[in-house]
Amino acid sequence: MKKVSISLFVLVFSMAAVAQQKHVSNTEPQQFILLFRFKSYAPPPTPDQIKASREKWELWMGGLAQQGKLLGGEQISFSGITISGFKKAVANNPVIANNEMVTGYMLLSAKDLREAEGIAKDCPILAFNGSVELRQIQPQLKQF
């Protein structure tokens, strides 16, 4: 009986989330997260490359900030730990998938996915053969 109650709650909660999404106005800006990934096997950049890259990032993010589209973001460390599974196993390294690791993120405001995609395509990490994963942040559910 307890499993049925939990399953029913999950189903109702999921349906409410879908219904909530359908009522979001298309005129309201949406929030997105951009996850920046760098090739784990890439050679470290030279000091000149770092300087040039930093200038490109500052111009790109500065322009987004002036437009009111930049909501936040940070570069993250190359080291870390991963905790996973029911047993809470700890690995002394961050996740590397497809030979890429997350090196930073940015929160972005855009009118829709197409606008966010256009912004992401200008990301300076692409010049270093990195990648940008773009995902919409789900709007918070209002209390039922």
Image (cartoon, helix red, strand yellow):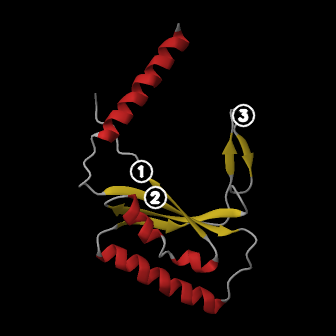
Determine the image quadrant of residue 47: bottom right
Give the residue drawn at x 35%, y 58%. Answer: 112
Work out how far the residue at label 2 is from the one at label 3, CA to CA, in angstroms. 29 Å
Viewer-proximal residue among 123 and 117: 117
Q: Residue furthest front?
A: 114
Crowd band around label 2 with a 10 angstrom C-alpha radius: few (<14), some (14–19), many (20+) = many
Amino acid at the residue labelled 1 = Ile
Q: Which residue is mark 1?
A: 137
Give the residue drawn at x 68%, y 57%. Answer: 94
Q: Which residue is mark 3?
A: 87
Amino acid at the residue labelled 3 = Lys
Give the residue drawn at x 69%, y 55%. Answer: 95
Contact (CB < 8 A) between labels 3 and 1?
Answer: no
Q: Which mark is residue 33?
A: 2
Q: Which mark is residue 11?
A: none
Amino acid at the residue labelled 2 = Ile
Work out how far the residue at label 3 is from the one at label 1, CA to CA, in angstroms. 29 Å
Give the residue drawn at x 55%, y 84%. Answer: 53
Determine the image quadrant of residue 114: bottom left
Mark nearest the camera among 3 and 1 is 1
Crowd band around label 3 with a 10 angstrom C-alpha radius: few (<14), some (14–19), many (20+) = few
